[in-house]
Each structure stands twice: as structure tokens, then as C-alpha cells.
Amino acid sequence: MIREIISSINLLRQPCQEVTKDDDIKSIIQDLKDTLVTLRGYALAANQIGLQKKICYCKIPKGNNEYTELVMINPKVIEKDKPVKFIDEGCLSFPGLRVTTKRYIFCTVTYLNEKFEECTSMFQDLESFVVLHECSHLEGRTILDEKWRAK
């Protein structure tokens, strides 16, 4: 089902709850996929569609009409590796807004896949930026919180 995108900063700043096997993850994943198809973006976290659960769906372009497609349940960033890059980042919850953020070029994340199997993956470049963005959402942080400020 296509869901409305949440733009309330108060709702987006609430950390999400862990997903359990009792949750209807198939329905949540389908809603994330259906909703993302209607938008111009690379990924969507469950709290962006009003579900306070730690699950996100990513469809990141690799070129030549190929994508990295990924469902992450209860993701945890276990390593962020330098170097960092300052990027002009947007968010589907804040259409038209661009913010300079500092993101790591490499990150490693543990998560459960759609079959509830444990996975550990390393991401780099655009994949890293997108995964870190979605993991931030699930922890209750947005690009407004990740905004880079010169000291």
C-alpha cells in the first residue's frame, strides 16, 4: 500500500522500536517498496511512513539500470571508516530541502534480512551515504540533526 510520507520533525525524531518476528514485516516491506516507487529517492525508513519500527528499504542505483536492493531490519552501524565526505543531501520527508552533511565513505552494518537471517555488509560511497541516512532515521535523527556545521 502506498503511504503518506511523514514530515513532522517531532515524529521523525522518535527512535524506532526493534522489529520482532511477531511484527508483520512482509506488509511493512511491501508498503515501503510501494511508497518508494512513487517517489524520486533511493530509500525509505519505516518511520517516514508512520511506522515506528527499525526497518528500511533501499534501492540504490549502480548504473546501467542496475540497483542494489536491500531490506534492513534492526540495522546497527558497527563501523564507520574514514575518509569522510561532505555531501549535499536531501530527504523524502523534506521535499526540496538540501543540507550539507558529513558522511563516511565506508560503513559496516549488521542487520536482519527479509528472512530474518543475520547479515553483515560493508558499504561504500553512495551506498554508504544512503545506508547511514536510513540508519539515522531509525535512531530518530534527520538530515537537520546531521547537518554539518563548521566549528
Image: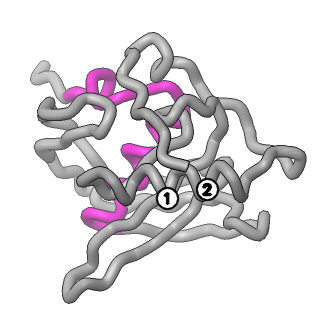
Q: Position of residue 48 (x, y in %)?
A: 46, 34
Q: Position of residue 46 (x, y in %)?
A: 55, 40
Q: Quick one: 31 or 80, which is closer to the camera?
A: 31
Q: Residues within 10 Å of mark 1 (few under 14, many from 20)?
A: many
Residue under the point 59% across and 25% down = 15
Query: Magenta segment range?
Result: 124-147
Q: Secondary structure at mark 2?
A: helix
Residue 84 vertical placement versus 102 (above, below): below
Most extreme residue toward the front, as rendered? 1
Q: Residues within 10 Å of mark 2 (few under 14, many from 20)?
A: many
Q: Position of residue 107 (x, y in %)?
A: 42, 59
Q: Is residue 21 magenta?
A: no
The answer to whether residue 136 is left or right of residue 76 is left
Q: Mark 1 near mark 2, Cβ–Cβ under 8 Å? A: yes
In the picture of the structure, the residue carrying the numbered disc 2 is 29
Q: Residue 8 lies in what quarter of the image?
A: top left
Residue under the point 55% across and 49% down = 1
In the image, what residue type sits under mark 1?
Lys
Residue under the point 57% across and 62% down = 71
Q: Quick one: 116 or 27, which is closer to the camera?
A: 27
In the image, what residue type sits under mark 2?
Ile
Say which mark, if any, is on residue 33.
1
Chief secondary structure of the magenta span?
A: helix
Q: Secondary structure at mark 1?
A: helix
Say which mark, if any, is on residue 3.
none
